[in-house]
Amino acid sequence: MDTDDPDREDLERAGPTERGLDRTAGRYAVLVRAGVIIPCGLFGLVAAPREHRAAAAALVVLVIAWCALRLLWTERRTPARLPRPTPARLVAVDAAVLLAAGLGQGAAGVRFAGSWVQALTGITAVTYAYEWAARPALALGMAALSYGAYIAGLAAAPDGRWPDAVPLVLRGAAETLIGLGCYAFVRRRARAADRVIARGAARRRSAAVDEARRAGERRHLATLHDTASTTLLMVADGAWDGGREPLRERARHDLEALGTAPAPESGRLDLADLLAGAAEHRYIAIRPDVRGPLPLPAEPALAIFHGVREAVRNVERHAGVAEAELYAARDEGGAVEVEVRDAGRGFDPDRVPAHRRGLAGSIEERMASAGGCARVDSRPGGGTVVRWRWPGPGRTAEPGGGPRVTGGGRPARSADRVRQGLLGGFRIAVLAVAVIVQFAFCLGELYSARATYTALWPQIAAFGLLTLVAAAGGLLAWTRGPSLAPAVRWTCVGLVLLASLAATVSVPGGAHLSPAHWSFGLVGWYGLFLLFDLPPVYFAAFLGAHLVLNFAGLAAGQALGSAVLASMGIVAVQVCGFQLAVGMIAVLLRRVAGSAARAAERDERLRIRAAVDESTHRDHQRRRLALARTTVPLLTGLADGSLDPSDPGVRSRCALEAARLRRLFAEYDGVDDQLVHELHATIDVAERNGVGVRLAVRGRATDLPRDVRRALIEPVAAVIVAAGSAVRATVVRTPGEVRLSAVADNNDQAMELWRTLRASHPTWSHIKIAGMATEHRLWVETIWRPGERSP
Amino acid sequence: MAPGGTITVVVIDDHPAVVAGAEQWYGTSERPIEVVAAGATTGAAWTPPGDTADVVVFDLQLNGGLPAYGELRRLVDAGRRVVVYTMRDDERTALTCLDIGASTFLTKAEGRDHLLAATVAVAEDRSYTPPALAGAIGANTAPDRPRLSDREQEVLIEWFQCESKRLVAERLGITERTVNTYLDRVRIKYANAGREAGTKATLVARALQDGLIQIDDL
């Protein structure tokens, strides 16, 4: 195989399990071939007549050299002095050796059908089926070439008994086909396992992308909350009394923060440095106790930094005290702990409405998305403590604390599934081989030799026992899955060995290992069927027992010369070596399962990375665009001084933008009635500005898409926020439509806002906006009719 | 009560402030309205002088508990004209009161003008549909609800949303009078539906008499 070209084209069509299986089978076929051919060649050399020794030795050396070359070529990196193994070179070398061995056997003194050259021919044909499983035509062609050369060579040899070879060749050809069939079957299992892995991977990938997007969104919202939303709300409230310059600086800082990429910040920062900056505040005296340096990954460091600033702002706004304590240190376990504590009036955390996001959104969620945890403890009259904890990389903050998804257990699970699939397939394939060999060949051999046995009944009993094992084992494998119960397994092993003994004892002297001794080659397949999923030593011991039983019977019947022993060795190696080799494949399958799962995991990580990067980038672009239209121009105006924060028009624009952001935050609260909840978030901003809002809701809550909610609320929210004094706001939901409306006292700002909003509102052909202004009143209505879709 | 004469009212509410407020508002009415009795329980409506009052203004949630539908039914069955006057602002309650036979349903948030107008209309056996009630009828999805025309539905919703008949009229390009006609028709349809009650029959009879509906419409 072209092992220097690591699967470049395979990657396109085959999954990791199938890829691994093909590669393993290809390399292993070469190894098995060498393992059978080399000992058989040496036995053949021993068995060769004296006058042909030199030619036989030359041929055996050629064959061994060929095996060695092929083994070298299976290395992942071809040794420097060798040419690269292209398929054409491999086929050319193999064909040349097969022709030389087949046609040269006469010169090497081979006269009989069951020679070492036949062993070479047979094993090459069978292993070719595995080596070139992806190209069955080539495998069959090479098998035909090797058998052709073998028969032609035997026919050309003086006294060559080539007709004897025909049944052997037929049997070999059948084994080749069985090999191809079994391999195709196992391969299909591999493909199915790959599909299962791929489906799981796709699911996990989309989950990971969703998780990353949610985390990104949370980070973005937290940043927005800490920066633009707070600043704009302060301007809107008219609460800004800190002078122009600090406001401009703040707006500049906000713009900077919003411009930074929302991708997870990388690198490390010293938290102590960051906290030194956060500990300076105009009105709140902060007593710091920061035991630096505290190097942290940037993401949790920034999460803590922003959180501390938010906590200090909360002290300023709500605590009613002018001082706070800041503590930060690393504990003995390596975890970093930070605390902001005040002795102010405190609050009841359970009674903070979901849309007031300061604490929940900015501090806790942001820290959670950075892999740590944060907690706010407060009670009315008892002050407030905010704590952050970063447990160090790779650890969870608290039981159930961090939302980090770790990969534990996943590769193991898919490896298990692949292993079950492959081994189950392998067991069925081996049983199929055993049954086919038993009924297609052995039955005929038994029948032809029926008159020669010393007694026929042990033969029939042995055949029956094996049939029983096939039926019972097959049934269990089919119904109970790939693994066998120990009782069943060992009973069957006993029965098979008993059959081996029974079939051997009545074989007449001299007929051992001949076709009349049909059980010799068959018993090993049953042993493999029963034992392949245990460590290979079990199957080796089984084969050993089988060989001992058979050779004991054989040795009792005749005198053994070295030539006879050698030719028997060839048969034994050929049969048992091949079976042992196939048994080793089971071990490899297990390994393939593991490495395939690892490869799948690696592929998956790369794909997840790419998918996450792409979606994060898209989200980032989308958010920038959304902010560029609204928030950014306002902040820019405040930063460069072109907008005057005391101008009522500017204040009402800021209020509107703050309301928009508040509604955006409320989108993520996940309450039952999202529409009303988001409307409440904007009403909240209006009420801070002293607008009295009477909200009435009719009809049942329905699920509306986020965009629809946004389009319904925004125009109405504009009127609510800009209203001078009192507003009547309503929500009406019937099965046919959803309507929002706001009626406000008319004023210039409201009209102005309404006009700009109407002009800039995205065109929603299925959201109707209606408005009406009289001398005293401004009335805006948005209507969504689910039946009327945009064209 | 003579036509145009003083209307007598009994106010049933367990909050003294509400009773005082109502009395004060009624005192500013063009049409003379007099609160003859008040109490925290319906007892005040059954004993003199409350037992002969033209209109019962009834807080549905006495003592803040469950809606006192039983009390309401007893009043309606005795032929009393009841203005349900409540903190509860949800359509289920409004529609149930209407079905029992309350003359109208008003939320306390709707304020003085609606209370006065409702009291006068109810005293004259005319219908009055304040915005909160209009919204409840407009959003009614019960399978056995009376069928309304598109225009009637539209008027109900717009009236609920803006609380100004003038705005509704302007918005829909009709007169305020027509707005009222639509609201009355809807109210008559509801009076004709569901549970039978003397007050409903009176309302329908008065609508026929006023020419709001023809006998064929029924």
Image: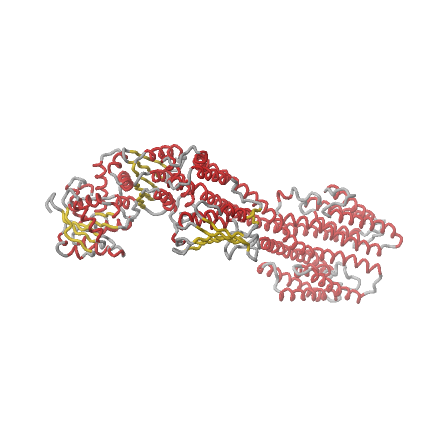
Res A626 visible: no
Q: Residue furthest right?
A: A51
Residue B109 percent coordinates (x, y): 26, 46
* A422 horizontally vs A273: left or right: right
Residue A703 percent coordinates (x, y): 39, 46
Q: Residue at x 39, y 44 (%)?
A: A704
Residue A466 percent coordinates (x, y): 67, 62
Q: Indicate the quadrant where residue B121 lies.
A: top left
Identify which residue, A701 or A710, lies in the foreground: A710
Identify which residue, A75 or B59, lies in the foreground: B59
Q: Residue at x 44, y 48 (%)?
A: A284
* A270 horizontally vs B23: left or right: right
Q: Residue furthest left?
A: B2
Quadrant for the C terminus of chain B in the image: top left
Identify which residue, A545 or A328, lies in the foreground: A328
Residue B177 percent coordinates (x, y): 20, 36
Please give the count of numbered marks on the rendered protein. 0
Colour scheme? secondary structure
Q: Indicate the quadrant where residue A479 lies.
A: bottom right
Res A635 visible: yes
* A290 horizontally vs A147: left or right: left
